[in-house]
Image (cartoon, rainbow, N blue to C red):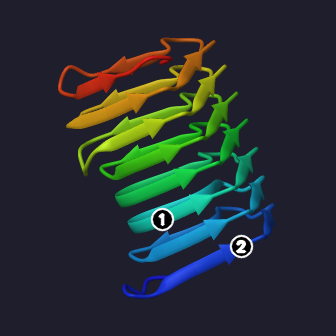
Amino acid sequence: NNNPGITFRVSGCLIHDNGSYGIYCNNMTAVISDCVIHDNGYGVYMNSGTLDISGCEIYGNSLHGMYQSSGTLNISNCDLYSNSQYGLYLYYAALNMENCGIWSNTLSGLYIRGGGGTKIITNSVIRNNGQDGLYIRESSSAEISFNSIYGNRSEERRVGKECRSRWSPYH
């Protein structure tokens, strides 16, 4: 959908076996809750908008579990795992992530690139991914608190020199 001012809502759905996108949103507000999204190209793809997603299981997608380009992603109580590329790829967008699990993705669990606002990651587990657990590149600021980041093939967490980050216990 490409309708600013409209809120797109999806709740309690099983979304699977779609060629390109499980859910695709463009320039809008979307609220997704309590869904299982698997075996698509992208599980959830948001281009320029606000996405509130909670209580979802996103796995087995042939590209990224989730992709957000610009806007704001608010994600809580979600699991993103066994996706063929990144669990979550954030590109020039703000992030508020809480109580999520990201594991066993082929590339990095959480890849953040560019500014677009503050990135806040709290009380989440990022483990056993094929590259970095958390990779922040070209971002202006990040707050990472009370997370478990371990068992990733490359580095547990990598932050580019241009990012100011605050790490709290249990990272």
**What crowding class fits label 2: few (fewer than 14 Cα within 10 Å), some (14-19), or many (20 or more)?**
some
Residue drawn 79% across and 70% down?
A: 13
Q: CA distance from mark 2 to mark 1?
A: 13 Å
Q: Is residue 125 left or right of residue 49?
A: right
In this view of the protein, can residue 108 be seen by the observer? yes
Q: Residue at x 66, y 19 (%)?
A: 128
Q: Which sits earlier in the primary sequence, circle 2 or circle 1? A: 2
On the image, the x and y values in percent for residue 124 come to 57, 33
Rendered position, 23 above or below 148 = below
Q: Is residue 25 above or below residue 159?
A: below
Position of residue 98 relative to residue 93, above or below, is above
Q: Position of residue 45 (x, y in %)?
A: 53, 60
Residue at image mark 1 = 51
What secondary structure is found at the residue carrying circle 2? Answer: strand
Say whether marks 2 and 1 touch (CB < 8 Å). no
Q: What percent of the width, then of the height, locates residue 121?
A: 44, 37
Q: Which residue is mark 2?
A: 11
At label 1, the amino acid type is: Leu
Question: Seen in the image, is 103 located left or right of residue 116?
Answer: right
Q: Position of residue 117 (x, y in %)?
A: 25, 50
The amino acid sitting under disc 2 is Ser
Nearer to the camera, 120 or 82: 120
Look at the numbered disc 1 and give the secondary structure of its residue: strand
Q: Is 166 placed left or right of 153 in the picture?
A: left
**Residue placed most toward the observer, 141 or 113:** 141
Mark 1, residues whose alpha carbon is within 10 Å: few (<14), some, or many (≥20)? Answer: many
Residue at the image position 50 percent from the left and 34 percent from the top: 110
87 vs 84, nearest the viewer: 87
Figure check: 100 above or below 25: above
Residue at image x 17%, y 26%?
162
Question: Residue 21 shows which numbered tag?
Answer: none
